[in-house]
Image: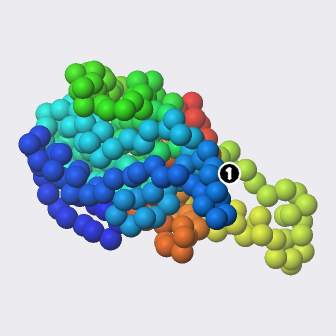
Amino acid sequence: MLFLKGTHMNTNIDKSAVSAAVRDAFNFEVVKLPLTGADNHYTPWYGLFRQDSGAYIGSGSISERYVPHTADDVCALVEAAANAFDNEVDLECHFNNGHYVSVAPTADYRHSVYGTADNAFPRIVISAGFDKESFMATLGIFRDACLNLMLMRMIEGTSVSIRHTRSLRPKMDDLIASFSRLADGWTTITDVIDHLQSREVELAGFLDAVYGTPSPEDLQRHHAGEKVRSVTMHKNRTEAIMKRVMRERWQTGRGAMGAGFTVSAWEAFNAVQGYSQHDATRRKQNGVAVGQFDRVLLASKDSAVLAAEKLALAA
């Protein structure tokens, strides 16, 4: 699937079509232009602008030395990622102050977690923001049971940093080697998934450990009939996550939760990550609702998701 804000196109592409697909999604360049003061007074600062719309990119100014990356650089990154997956991939492309691409291989890479209804698939997510000196590529997990796209941070060998140089095209051999090593991490990830599936946790306690609990003072005010925001938020979030888990257990054929609301650590982590990706309230960006890919990126940086990953791995 190719995805760009407001545009959906289903396709499965081979190596010869990767660059064309990426260029079609990102059919513009980002250029560096001087910033002037009143009456066109000189300043030493520059800004980044979309060449097609003139929209400002980023949250601040840059120096004269800054060199923005190009669409060709993004193509080189995606081609190297596709090479790691035997050159037959689906792409999801997104732009938000930078280029973001999810690279998905064929279903041959499917890992069965629980029967045939709970499966995990690898995704290489390329982050080429304009506010960083390097690009980041992360080997993520797509879970079909809940449509979660997870970028776990604590599994060794699942991310690589690539220097932001003037042109990546001459570095293709090095890029291909880096992405091949990244794809090799899928075996490590599936071992971790199986470990999480084999461990049980008490869901309510897991959520309290991740999010914390209202203070005794707030609980006392709540029991006295006062509306207390922290108590309401805790109750609503816990209920939403519990419903998510129950729905996913039904979908995957697991049945009701065990005594004490016990679930696997895999389910508990997915519940927190899924809540952050799909359910958590997100502020509009420039008056526009937060899109699907933005939610994935926001969830990957959510402190609660990071805490849940750490807790699940320690189960």
Q: Judge left or right: residue 76 versus residue 35.
A: left
The correct choice, above or below, for 64 with respect to 29 in the image is: above
Q: Amino acid at mark 1?
A: Tyr
Would you place residue 249 above or below residue 107 in this image?
below
Q: Residue placed at 86% from the left, 78% from the top? A: 225
Residue 76 in sight in this render? yes
Q: Residue at x 54, y 67 (%)?
A: 285
Tell me if mark 1 has few (under 14), some (14-19) or many (20+) residues whose alpha carbon lies within 10 angstroms of its own.
Answer: some
279 horizontally vs 215: left or right: left
Q: Quadrant location of the C terminus? A: top right
Residue 15: x and y in percent read: 11, 40
* Residue 83 image position (x, y, % from top left): 18, 32
Q: Relative to 4, is 89 on the left or the right?
A: left
- Residue 100 point in image, percent of width and height: 37, 49
Asked whether residue 192 appears in the rendered view, the answer is no
In this view, the residue in front, 224 or 260, is 224
Task: Identify residue for label 1.
Answer: 211
| Local secondary structure at mark 1 | helix
